[in-house]
Amino acid sequence: MQKISSPIAQRSGFDKSGYYFIGLVAIVLSGFWKSYFSSFFKEVTSDYAFYFHFHATMVSLWIVMLIVQPILIRKKKLNAHRSIGKLSYLLMPLLVLSIFLMHNYIGKLFPGKADFMFVMGQGILLLLILFIIAIWNRHNVNVHARAMVSTGIIFIEPALIRLLHWVHIPNPNAYYITVAIVSLLLITLIILERKQKNGRWVFPLTLCMYLIAGNVKVHALDPLANWLVQLPLTPSPTVMDLPIPQNEIDGYTGEWDDRHNTVTYKKEKQLWMLSIERGHADSTRLLFQGNGTFIGDKIRPLCLYFKLKDGKAEAFNSYFAYIYGGTARRKN
C-alpha cells in the first residue's frame, strides 16, 4: 500500500479537483435556487420540513469537503487532510440518512410520487459504494482520489435536471440531457486516464453503476419500496381539508400571471385551480391547510402558498412535491 504524500497526490492528477468542484457549487445553487434557496428571501415562503434542511446541510458539507481536501493536499497540509477525512466517517452516514429520511417523508406526503428504489439505487447505494471504495483505498491515493471525485459527480444530476427545468426543458428530455452530460464527463475522464496504470478502473465502474441504477427499474422490488416508505422514520404529514372562510374564498380567485395560464375559481363554496400545460387543461380542488396554504386534491404533489393583503391574495408560490413551480402574481 502507498502511504499518502504530497508528491503522490499530485501525480494522481486530482490535487486540483477542489477548484473544479467550485463549479459544482454553482450548479447546485443555480439548480436549487428556485426550489429551495430563494425561499429564504421571498415574502411568500414554503413550509419545508426539517428533513429538507437536514439534507441540504449534509450535501453542502460534503461538497465543501470535496473542495477543501484536495486543496489541503496541494498545500501539503496532510494532518488537516487526515483530520477532515476522519470526519467523513460520520458525514457520509448522516448524508445517506438525510436522503433516506427526506424520501420517506415525501413518500408519505405524496403517495406514489417518491420512487424509493430509484433513490436507493442511484442515491444511497451508489454513494455508499464509492465511499467504501475511497476509504478502503485511503492509502492508495490514485484509487482514493478518483472514488471521492466520483461522489461529487453523482451530485451533478439532481441539480442539473432542475436547472434545465428552469430554462423550460421538461422531463423526460431534461433527464436524458443530464444523463448524457454526466456520462460524457465520466467517459472523458476514462479517455484521459487510458494510460494510467493505477486506479483507472474507478471511473468505468462509476459510469456502469450510474447508468444501471438510473435506467434499470426492477418492479419486483416495488413491495420493498412501499414498505420502506411506510417505515415510521418520519411522522406522517397531515393533509387537511379545512373549510375555507367564506369571507376569504373570493380573495383567492382570479387569473394568475404564470406559464401555466393558471386560474383559481370558486365552485360549490370550494376553491379550484385550472392550469394548462403543453396544451392540456387540468383542474384540481384545493384542500385548505390554513394560513393561505393549499394542497391539490387531484394533483396531490401541488402545494400553493398564497400571500394575502387586505383580504385578497396578490401572489402565490407553487411547489410540486419538493420541486419549485414558480411565483404567480394576480393579473388584475
Image: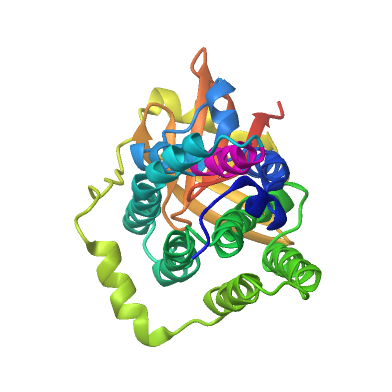
Pick whichever, 88 or 179, lies toward us: 88
- Front residue of this view, candidates 30 and 75: 75
State whether residue 65 is above or below residue 124: above
Counting from the top left corner in percent of width and height, residue 31 is at 66, 44
Dominant secondary-structure state across the stretch colored magenta: helix
Asked if one can make out residue 235 in the rendered structure from this viewpoint, the answer is yes
* Residue 86 drawn above or below residue 142: above
Residue placed furthest toward the bottom? 220
Please provide percent x and percent y for residue 152: 59, 53
Q: Which residues are magenta?
A: 62-74
Nearest to the observer: residue 327 or residue 2: 2
Query: Who's the residue at 55% across and 76% down the image?
Result: 209
Q: Residue furthest left?
A: 232
Residue 64 among those drawn in magenta: yes
Which colour scheme appears in the figure?
rainbow
- Is 10 in the magenta? no
- Judge left or right: residue 63 versus residue 23: left
Q: Is residue 260 visible?
A: no
Quarter residue 66 falls in = top right
Instruction: Estimate the x, y position of residue 37 in percent, counting from the top left.
Output: 57, 32
Give the quadrant of the C terminus.
top right
Quadrant of residue 103 within the rendered picture: bottom left
